[in-house]
Image (cartoon, rainbow, N blue to C red):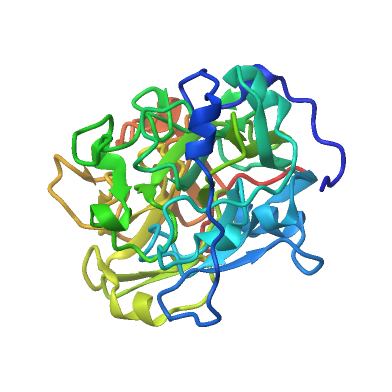
Amino acid sequence: MNFPTPFNIPGQLALVLGLSLLIPSLGSAQEREGQTKVHTPTRGPSNLIVKPLSAALVPADLVRLLVGPGVTFTNVVYTGDLLAAGTFTGGKDIVGFERGIILGTGKVEDVVGPNTLDRTNTNLEEPGDADLAALAGFNTKDAAVLQFDFIPTEPTLSIQYVFSSEEYNEFVGDPFNDVFAFFVNGSNCATIGGSPVSINTVNNGNPFGSGGPNSDSFINNVISDGGSINTEMDGLTVVLTCSASVNPGVANTLKLAIADGSDALVDAAVFIDTGILGDRVGVMRDGQWFLDLNGNDELDEEEVNNPFTFGQPGDEPIVGDWNNDGFTEIGVRRGNKWFLDVNDNRILDSCGIDICIENYGIPSDQAVAGDWNGDGFSAVGVKRGSAWFLDENGNDAWDGCVQDTCIPVWGLPHDVPVAGSWRPQ
C-alpha cells in the first residue's frame, strides 16, 4: 500500500545490510521455508506491545513520535504494507529503549515474544525498493519505507536503533541478507566499524559461538543456542547509534527503509528510538537528576527510584551537548567552577575524564550554555546583571571580548537566561 508518491532518491544512496550479492539457488530457497507465528491473546507486563499502522495510526504519527515534540516535518511518505510498520512499547528490557517505531519485512506484530519459531515469515506480496535493489545488486521484496522532510535546530542528528532478524544464526554467512537503509540527505548512516550493519557483519559465527565480526555488538536469542530474550527475533544487535550532520533551520530529508533480499522468506525488523530531534524534560533535586529518558512526559516509578547523582546540594544545573554526539549531557556549576559530564555516563568522574572548568564567571552569575560558534559542541557562558559573557571559542576559559562574546545589555538584571537555536520568523 502506498501513501503519497515517494521522493526520487538515487539508488546508490541506500545503506545495505547484506554484503553478499549472490542469488540463492532453488535448493537453498526450499530449505528456507518460512513459518507462520501464532499469537496468544495474553500479554505479560514485560512483553512488547506492537501496534501496526491502521486508520487510527497513520505514517505521520510515526514521524511525530520519531522526531519528538516541537520539530517541524513535512512530505511524509510511507510505502509498504500497513502490517509492516508501527509503534512499540515495553522494549526497555528487550531492545534497550522503552518505546519507538518499528519497520519490518513481515508483520511487525510477529516480533512479540516468546521465541517459538526459528524462521518466522510473512510474505506480504509487496514490491521491493528500487533504491535498495540498485545498490544491493539483487532484487528486493516486501519493502517498508518511511521518508519525510524535517527542519532541525541543531547541526547533528543521532538515531538509536536495534537491528533484529530471524536469519540468525543458521543463515550467517549465506547470501540471504536483507536490505536496510538509514540515510540523511543522501548519506548513509548506520554502519559499524565502517561496514553496513547486517547479519554478516554483526554475529558470533555459524555455528553460534565459533566467532564472528563485531560479536560484542551481537545478542543471541536462538533458544537452542541459549537465547532467553522475550522477543520472537532470533538475534539482535545491541543499541547502535548513527550520527549525521544536518543543516539547521532548513528542510533536510530522512529515509528509513528495510526489505527482504533475494527472496521474501524469513523476516527482519528494526527498532528505532523516539525523540531523535526533540528534547525531553528533567529536573535536578539536591544533586540528583530525574530525566524523562523514555520520552513519555511522565515521571515514571523507575525514573523516581533510579535517579542519577551528579553534583551536590546547592549546585546549579547546566546541560548541553558537551561532546557533539547529538545528545544532551548534564553538568553543574559550583560557585565559579563547572563540572560537565562529557562522557555521558551520568557520573562525576575525575577531571581527566569529565570536563572541569576553573574560574569562569563569579558565584553570583547566572549559568547558561549553548553552541555559540556552530561547531556542534555546547560551551559555557554566564549572565551578570544584563550583560552576557559567552565562551565563543569553546576553550573552557574566558579570553576577553575580542576572542569570546560579550553582549553588554540583553534583558533585565533579574531575568533568567536561556539559549537555543530559535527559528527566524
Image x and y of residue 341, in percent = 28, 50
In the picture provided, is 254 more to the left or to the right than 322?
right
Q: Residue 120: x and y, percent?
A: 51, 53
Query: Could you say where residue 85 lies in the image, as x and y percent from the top left?
Result: 66, 54
55 over 6 or under it: above or below: below
Which residue appears at 33% of the width and 62% of the height? 229
Camera-side residue of 112 and 301: 112
- Is 354 placed above or below 304 here? above
Which of the 4 quarters of the picture holds residue 45? bottom left
Can you see residue 365? no
Tell me residue 329's x, y (percent).
37, 51
Q: Nearer the viewer, residue 21 or 194?
A: 21
Q: Which of 122 and 18 lies nearest the eye of the viewer?
A: 122
Residue found 41% across the figure and 46% down from its top: 381
Rendered position, 284 above or below 36: below
Q: Could you tell me which quadrant the C terminus lies in?
A: top right
Report whether 333 appears left or right of 106: left
Residue in view at x 55 percent, y 81 percent: 41
Q: Report the side of 407 relative to 227 (left or right).
A: right
